[in-house]
Image (tube, helix red, strand yellow):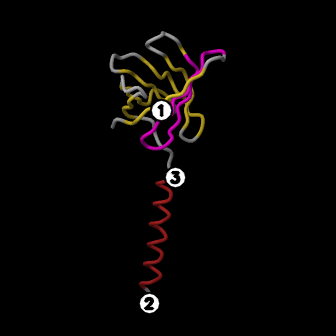
Amino acid sequence: MRLLPSALAGLVLSGALLTAASAAPLSPAGTWRVQDDTASIRIAPCGHRSFCGVAGNGEMILDHMRETGPNAWTGRINDSRSGSVYDGTISLVDERTLRVHGCMQGGGMCGDQSWTRAR
């Protein structure tokens, strides 16, 4: 009978560790395919609690996205096609989906995209 409390304690501890691991915040680090599937963006840490995203041609697309909450970062988004710069937010919907939201600096037009994790 002494084994039962020990086994029960082990199960409780295992469950607590599993719950803690699943509650850990997700990271945007990795390679993402943009919504229209025309480019891949590599996101990596680039400063204290921030991330940058670089296109295959070396151009900075996500510029110092700083953590603003669980699974959310805010910074600048550079549009390589138009040359425009946007105030932007990225947020992880889940492990495979990154929501990218940008607005013209100073307000005005805004847009959203969903990027898919490539690897």
Label 3 neighbourhood size at 10 Å, few (<14), some (14-19), many (20+)? few
- At x 46% / y 60%, what residue is drawn? 18
Q: Residue under label 3, please give it.
A: 23
Q: Earlier in the sequence, mark 1 or mark 2?
A: 2
Quarter holding the C terminus is: top left
Mark 1 or 2: in front is 1
**Does 99 appear in magenta?**
yes
Give the image location of residue 22, x and y in percent.
48, 54
Quarter holding the N terminus is: bottom left
Label 1 neighbourhood size at 10 Å, few (<14), some (14-19), many (20+)? many
Amino acid under disc 1:
Ser
Q: Is residue 17 above or below residue 45?
A: below
Amino acid under disc 2:
Met
Identify the mark at residue 1; answer none if there is no mark: 2
- The answer to whether 52 appears left or right of 72 in the picture is left
The residue tagged with tag 3: helix, strand or loop? loop
Q: Is residue 40 above or below residue 91?
A: above
**Does 3 appear in magenta?**
no
Q: Residue under label 1, please give it.
A: 114
The residue tagged with tag 2: helix, strand or loop? loop
Amino acid under disc 3:
Ala
Give the image location of residue 58, x and y in percent.
35, 17
Magenta extent: 86-106
What is the distance, in whole Å, between disc 3 and disc 2 at their CAs? 34 Å
Give the image location of residue 2, x and y in percent.
44, 87
Answer with the quarter of the image where residue 7 lies. bottom left
